[in-house]
Image (spheres, rainbow, N blue to C red):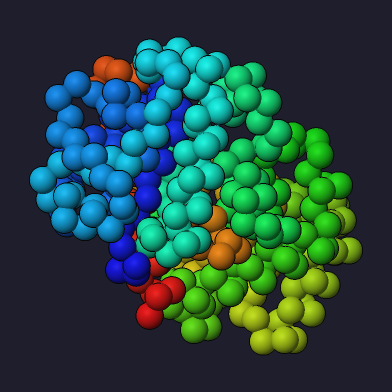
Amino acid sequence: MGAGAVALTCGEPAGIGPELAAAAWARLKGALPFFWIGDPAHLPPGTPVETIHDPRDALIAGARALPVLPHPFPEPAVPGRPAPANAPAVIEVIARAVALVRQGRAAALCTGPIHKRALQEGAGFAFPGHTEYLAHLAGVEQVVMMLACDGLRVVPATIHIPLARVPAALTAQLLERTIRITHDALRRDFALPAPRIAVAGLNPHAGEGGAMGREEIEMIAPLLERLRAEGLALSGPLSADTMFHERARRGYDAAIAMYHDQALIPIKTLAFDEGVNVTLGLPFIRTSPDHGTAFDIAGRGIARPDSLIAALRMAAELAARRAS
């Protein structure tokens, strides 16, 4: 892999993030070097821990215990009950991990799930989510959220906004930038020299010739035609209800959807426990498990680490490709 181990942030300590970190290490051990940034007291009792002070130490320590780069929190972690006083430290851990990756001291970033409301109430967090905060830290204008699993990569052009606001937010400029960022990332990080991208329509049946909406006719189709003239392999606008069956998925390397649920429903149906969130357009690799804090099961020891393990593996693989 790239320069060193993957940095894994703790996320919301009252959620399932800490127990998943411990479970992921128990399954991976030294096979995939990563280190956890957080308060060791928040990990499940009995977790084998080795405190490190340099991320490079994780390459050896990981075979013996979960390498932990300690970051003190003011309050203990009570499963299912986020403490407002801990919110600033959750944000600090993210910023600290980003700095380590940008300095080349960690290979990539994998983030534990946060609880946006807890951060807003406890620390005045001003961003809609992780993705937007990472873009702010990196100083980039736009990033793209990709959800990936075996057999499907999908990108929503608009993300965390109400459905009623999607038509106005879905501009030609936004869609073009989303397509270009996705195309470039597929070439650079996923080793696809000529990526094939399928683009959904906004309306049912891709507008059905204007009978169900005109966004496809007036904006989406002309944009795709212009980008095809540049050499991009684009199909669409396609009816979203026929894009995601097995035969259709064999015809493209990634799909671009117009809004959150249009993208996330198919991937969570196909790979609810193994999906990975990848942020495209950053100057570093960032992945995360495709689930939230799961307060309802936190602390019960039943949360599955599959998505986190997949996210750690993808972070390491993408970092290795980018470094080669």
Q: Is residue 291 visible?
A: no
Write the residue at 67% across / 37% down: 128
Residue 123 picture location, percent across and down: 63, 25
Q: Nearer the viewer, residue 131 or 77?
A: 77
Write the residue at 68% across / 59% down: 140
Question: Is residue 135 left or right of 268 when viewed as pictured?
Answer: right
Image label count: 0
Q: Residue furthest front?
A: 53
Q: Nearer the viewer, residue 139 or 266?
A: 139
Question: Is residue 260 left or right of 4 when viewed as pictured?
Answer: right
Residue 115 picture location, percent across and down: 53, 27
Task: Work out whether 46 lies above or below 130.
Answer: above
Q: Residue furthest left?
A: 64
Write the residue at 29% across / 23% down: 41
Task: Work out whether 99 lies above or below 176.
Answer: above
Image quadrant containing the N terminus: bottom left
Q: Quadrant of residue 13?
A: top left
Q: Is residue 128 visible?
A: yes
Task: Work out whether 20 lies above or below 96.
Answer: above
Residue 126 picture location, percent across and down: 70, 33
Q: Quadrant of residue 160?
A: top right
Q: Nearer the viewer, residue 3 or 30?
A: 3
Residue 194 picture location, percent across and down: 53, 83
Question: Is residue 265 left or right of 207 when viewed as pictured?
Answer: left
Question: Is residue 292 left or right of 261 when viewed as pictured?
Answer: left
Image quadrant containing the C terminus: bottom left
Write the residue at 39% across / 67% down: 319
